[in-house]
Amino acid sequence: MHRFRSLALCCAALAGPAAAQDLTVVSWGGAYEAAQHAAMVAPFAQETGTQVEMVRYDGTAGALARRGASEGWDVIDMLTDQARVACAKGLLLELDPQALLGAEALADFAPAAPSRCAVPQNVYARVMAYDERAFLGVKPTRIEDFFDVERFPGGRAVQKSPDGILEWALMAEGVPPAQIYGLLSTDRGLRLAFRKLDTIRDHIVWWRTTDEPAQMLEDGRATMAVGYNGRFFDAAELGGAPIDVVWDGQIVGVEVWAIAATTDAPDAARAFVAQASSPEAMARLAERIPYGPARVSAYARIGSNPKTGTPMRAYLPNAPQHGARALVRDAAWYANTEELRARRFQAWLNEAEE
């Protein structure tokens, strides 16, 4: 049934208006976007004849609101919580997952299921990485080490955002992963997290784009960094950078495909999402950058990196050797606390200027 449906989608795209319509697919740039292009965009363009342009953005629903209509965005790669926010604001086209993917496919998605505005596409991890040249003896092995600037001196590359670092601050204080988001929902929990951040305030080097953490480790601006596992893999395994990843405390999240409410090519956009959400496309992506597929049946299809021959399953966020202390990113908490987190984080930043 799945093969028949995929064939039907391709035929519809070739015979109907989707083939005549250009698509703008919005993503995050760098190695990730390059992997998406090779695994998903190029195959779709070749099979359907659709012209596809890829555009970079900062991953936020705010950017979609500001730029989506004027720049003709069609399909957007989003974090689950940002898709929730955008959907609630009417910025995304509502989907019928069963009609789009088929009833049989819906049971194949894990750890998250398709929603009324988004279809899961990959599982990523926010991890800690370090410059191997900086620590020739004892190496960092746990999240607590990120906050220990006496044993592990040097700059700390951190996204200029409260995302992820608040969870790690509590984890470094000994809070179990299961209690993190409950505690961060209280004033006491936020105060505890920011108090922990105070211990590394003078060592933080801020980054804004997702390719910067690896660059900061390579050029010596930081000895430890917060970033995404796929970006560090690309820098280390493909670029030869002296970077090692610490999987302890990894924060596991889900990326989704969504369609802008203002798209002028809804048929082509739906056809792209359906094809990019197939097990074959997800496996091709995981072979190029180690973000796990969002469908169970895709795992058996994952082979080696086409450039290096590296078997890729061992580098996925949910590989068994990566340890037990992991935190699943709570998309609902993120969506519901966006303004609160931003306000408290800005207040913390302002303290340094007073």
Image (cartoon, rainbow, N blue to C red):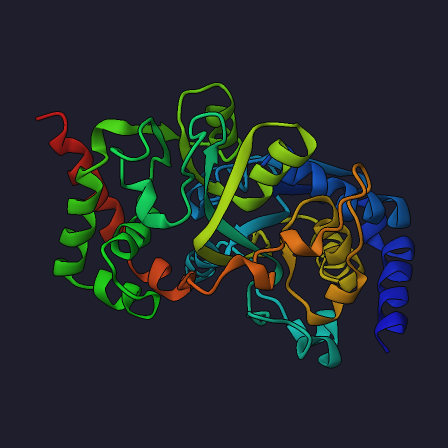
Q: From the viewer's perspective, is 21 left or right of 295?
A: right
Question: Which of the image's four quarters has the N terminus?
Answer: bottom right
Please state which of residues 305 and 93 is positioned toward the viewer in this rendering. Answer: 305
Query: Can you give x and y, in whole percent of width and height, for residue 59 in the image?
Result: 49, 43
Residue at figure coordinates x 72%, y 81% from the top left: 103
Q: Identify whether 133 is placed above or below 139.
A: above
In this view of the protein, can residue 262 be seen by the observer? no
Residue at figure coordinates x 58%, y 51% from the top left: 260
Question: Which of the image's four quarters has the C terminus?
Answer: top left
Where is residue 162, by image quadrant? top left
The single residue placed furthest to the front in the displayed view is 137
Please state which of residues 127 and 138 is positioned toward the viewer in this rendering. Answer: 138
The single residue placed furthest to the left in the displayed view is 354
Residue at figure coordinates x 34%, y 35% from the top left: 160
In this view of the protein, can residue 112 be seen by the observer? yes
Q: From the viewer's perspective, is 64 left or right of 40?
A: left
Query: Can you give x and y, in whole percent of width and height, for residue 216 in the image?
Result: 46, 25
Query: Can you give x and y, in whole percent of width and height, for residue 276 in the image?
Result: 73, 56
Where is residue 10, by image quadrant? bottom right
Please state which of residues 176 and 255 is positioned toward the viewer in this rendering. Answer: 176
Query: Can you give x and y, in whole percent of width and height, for residue 2 in the image?
Result: 83, 73
Q: From the viewer's perspective, is 314 left or right of 338?
A: right
Q: Identify whether 310 is placed above or below 83.
A: above
Q: Number of marks in the image?
A: 0
